[in-house]
Amino acid sequence: MNWPNENWHPIGDISDIPLRGARCVKTPQGKIAVFRTAENEVFAIEDHCPHKGGPLSQGIVHAKAVTCPLHNWVISLETGKALGADQGEVRTIPVRNEDGALFIALESLMMAAE
């Protein structure tokens, strides 16, 4: 597979994340929540709700979204945007799956932080 010219950092194996669950990765730019959907798709977003900063990694994963455990905001795992009537968004982080080995592109976080 041909990936963009970014440095990919290993973060574990897909089996480390339960179906419809999440795990956190600590980076110099903050915590990243890595989600696994029921269809075995993997997404990475910042681990704080744009509403009140709730830990999205502790939310309920459904389809390609997560519901914040604090105030039930629904955040798209694909775009990082709040769904429904709510407004706000979190950054998404490129993630790739190579036969179960997961990698994230930390450079995208660093560029966004500058």
Image (cartoon, rainbow, N blue to C red):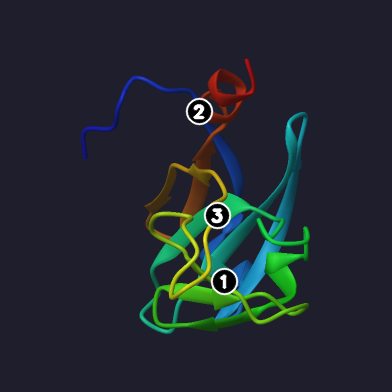
Q: Label 1: which residue?
A: 15
User: What residue sits right under mark 2 in the picture?
Assistant: 108
Q: Foreground mark, 1 or 3?
A: 3
Q: Does residue 103 lie above or below 101 as drawn?
A: above
Q: Is residue 14 left or right of residue 78?
A: right
Q: Residue at x 50, y 51 (%)?
A: 102
For residue 21, which quarter of the picture? bottom right
Q: Residue at x 57, y 71 (%)?
A: 15
Give the mark nearest the N terminus, 2 or 1: 1
Rendered-image quadrant of the C terminus: top right
Given the image, on which type of amino acid does mark 1 rest? Ser
Can the viewer see residue 45 in this picture? yes
> Which three-letter amino acid code belongs to the residue tagged 2?
Ser
Would residue 19 be visible to someone looking at this image? no
Please name whichever residue, 27 or 50, is drawn nearer the observer in this view of the structure: 50
Q: Nearer the viewer, mark 2 or mark 1?
A: 2
Mark 1 to mark 3: distance in Å? Answer: 31 Å
Whether residues under marks 3 and 2 lie with C-beta atoms below 8 angstroms apart, the answer is: no
In the image, what residue occupies the spot 43% across and 75% down? 84
Q: Count neighbours of disc 2 (C-alpha within 10 A) and say few if under 14, some if 14 to 19, many if 20 or more.
A: some
Q: Are marks 1 and 3 in contact (CB under 8 Å)?
A: no
The extreme top residue here reads 114
The CA distance from mark 3 to mark 2 is: 19 Å
Q: Which residue is mark 3?
A: 88
Answer with left or right where residue 58 lies relative to residue 73.
Answer: right
Q: Is residue 1 above or below residue 12?
A: above
Look at the numbered disc 3 and give the secondary structure of its residue.
Answer: loop
Q: Which kind of residue does numbered mark 3 sit on?
A: Gly
Q: Around disc 1, counting alpha carbons within 10 Å, would you say few (fewer than 14), some (14 to 19), or many (20 or more)?
A: few
Q: Quadrant of the N terminus?
A: top left
Task: Where is residue 62? Give x, y as percent.
Answer: 48, 84
